[in-house]
Image: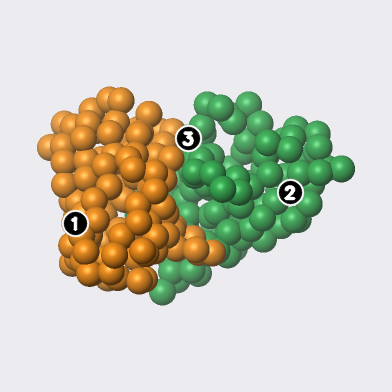
Amino acid sequence: VLTQSPLSLPVTPGEPASISCRSSQSLLHDSGYNFLDWYLQRPGQSPQLLIYLGSDRASGVPDRFSGSGSGTDFTLKISRVEAEDVGVYYCMQALETPRTFGQGTRLEIK
Amino acid sequence: QVQLQESGPGLVKPSQTLSLICTVSGDSISSGNHYWSWIRQPAGKTLEWIGRIYTSGATNYNPSLESRVTISVDTSKNQLFLSLSSVTAADTALYYCVRDWGGAHPDYWGPGTLVTVSS
């Protein structure tokens, strides 16, 4: 089970934001990689891969997005929130099937 | 540019079978580099992984749906299929076709197709 917090996150543009994702079991693979991904679902759009393996940015993702953590505790950070970052953020465990997702964190602009 | 496009009936009656097609362009299902998955999202809720298939035909399904779901491919048409039997209102959702990059990371998503189960 993946538990995200907060579920709602109002942020002023230019300010940082942080989302937590906690797993009920370790997502650390024998390879040394953490199989935890982050997605952003903008309003009316399909989810977009932001971060994979806990901390690697997907192609084209701005460097203001960063992922960290290991084992069961992970964090997605946005260094300076922009208007286009509005949407729902999901974490997903990619260690085993069935894949499972967190409940989602809705980021809104103040 | 990889593109996925879901298609199928938008309305299915209870107890009937939901059948969707995903047409892939910009990548080959038979390349063997990725898995191909279906994920769904009820309105206002989180995402639910349905299952995936590899080019060999090997599949993995969500145990919560396994008794009712079948995923298959037609490599000659570069298409992915989803069949979900005995549907109820709980199966009403936006259904996404997804490329599972490296077998682990959904990186390309279709726009989704809304399926409503109602009589």
| Tag in front: 1 or 3 | 1
Say what amino acid the circle numbered 2 marks: Thr
Chain A's shade in the image?
orange
Compared with residue B93, is residue B109 higher up or lower down, i.e. above or below? Answer: below
* Residue at 26% across, 42% down: A20
* Residue at 39% across, 44% down: A7
Marked residue chain, label 1: A
Q: Are the residues flagged by discs 1 and 3 from a single subunit?
A: no
Percent position (x, y) of residue A82?
30, 70
Of all residues, the one furthest to the left in this rendering is A32
What is the spatial separation of the Cα atoms under label 3 and label 2, in whole angstroms? 25 Å
Q: Secondary structure at mark 2?
A: strand
What is the spatial separation of the Cα atoms under label 1 and label 2, in whole angstroms? 37 Å
Q: Quadrant of the N terminus of chain A?
A: top left
* Label annotation for residue B15: none
Chain B's shade in the image?
green
* Residue at 27% across, 47% down: A19
Q: Which residue is mark 3?
A: B60
* Label annotation for residue B116: 2
Q: Secondary structure at mark 3?
A: strand
Q: Which residue is mark 1?
A: A66
Chain-order first, disc 3 or disc 2: 3
Crowdedness near tag 3: few (<14), some (14–19) or many (≥20) residues, C-alpha within 10 Å: some
Crowdedness near tag 1: few (<14), some (14–19) or many (≥20) residues, C-alpha within 10 Å: many
Please state which of residues B21 and B45 is positioned toward the viewer in this rendering: B45
| Number of numbered discs overlaid on the protein picture | 3
Percent position (x, y) of residue A105?
38, 48
Question: In the picture provided, is B5 more to the left or to the right than A64?
Answer: right
| Tag in front: 3 or 2 | 2
